Image: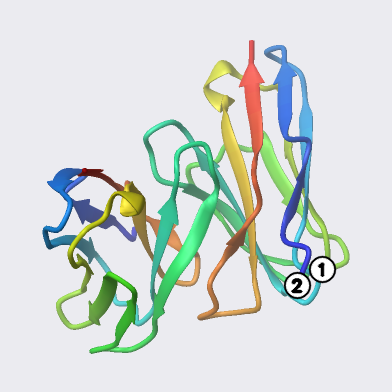
Amino acid sequence: ELKVEQNPLFLSMQEGKNYTIYCNYSTTSDRLYWYRQDPGKSLESLFVLLSNGAVKQEGRLMASLDTKARLSTLHITAAVHDLSATYFCAVDDKIIFGKGTRLHILP
Amino acid sequence: DTGVSQDPRHKITKRGQNVTFRCDPISEHNRLYWYRQTLGQGPEFLTYFQNEAQLEKSRLLSDRFSAERPKGSFSTLEIQRTEQGDSAMYLCASSLGVSSPLHFGNGTRLTVT
């Protein structure tokens, strides 16, 4: 059974700092997705990574995929308060989600 | 692109009753997914469709849950003999196909009393 693990599950950080969220998955997959969810809202797509070594960037967020290590990272550069949200990675055709990383950025 | 629409937004039901939710995906999207989400958790996969074909149903789901997508457009999710543990947000999402991002609806919040 496919398992998707994210860490950390909760992250509180200062504005202006950099940090990385990790997503490990248990079986072979060459498709990985990152989503954002704000409190009380539905999920919004951030990135779709489709091959080993894929890297995508949007603003202060950058996602990468290493299919051999079964690892994806979401890097936050110079965090701002507006990035406070829960971030989920998801894998596979069925699109199985991790538990999410709740990110709280302190002004 | 009118987005993914779910109906109703909220449903309160008594334990033992049956409920049915509807999802209208984005019109040209051939993949449709159902998830369940509880507070503080990630979306839990329930089932997904490619056009009208149901590709897989979660092994975690009991036989009380069933989903259909009869003409490859809208989908329904039915829960029979609801239990308090079924209380959750039920999310529907659609995509153009494999490797395309999911577009989520606003969900149906189910409360079983």
Query: Which residue ends up furthest to the right in the rendered image?
Result: B71
Q: Tell me the quarter of the picture where residue A36 sits.
A: bottom left
Do discs 2 and 1 share a chain?
A: yes
Q: Is residue A7 left or right of residue B37?
A: left
Q: Quadrant of the N terminus of chain B?
A: bottom right
Are the residues tagged 2 and 1 within 8 Å (C-beta)?
yes
Rendered residue at 71%/28% (across/down): B10
Q: How many marks?
A: 2
Render colour scheme? rainbow
Q: Quadrant of the C terminus of chain B?
A: top right
Residue A78 percent across, percent down from the top left: 18, 64
Residue type highlighted by circle 2 = Asn
The residue indicated by pointer 1 is B72
Q: Tell me the quarter of the picture where residue A20 sits.
A: bottom left
Residue A42 percent across, percent down from the top left: 55, 48
Rendered residue at 27%/75% (across/down): A62
**Secondary structure beneath label 2:** loop
Residue type highlighted by circle 1 = Gly
Q: Is residue A17 left or right of residue B29?
A: left
Q: Could you tell me if residue B80 is visible in this image?
A: no
Residue A65 percent across, percent down from the top left: 25, 79
Residue A44 percent across, percent down from the top left: 51, 59
Q: Is B61 or A84 nearer to us in this picture? A: A84
The residue indicated by pointer 2 is B51
Q: Is A80 or A9 nearer to us in this picture? A: A80
Q: Is residue B48 left or right of residue A46?
A: right
Q: Chain of mark 1?
A: B
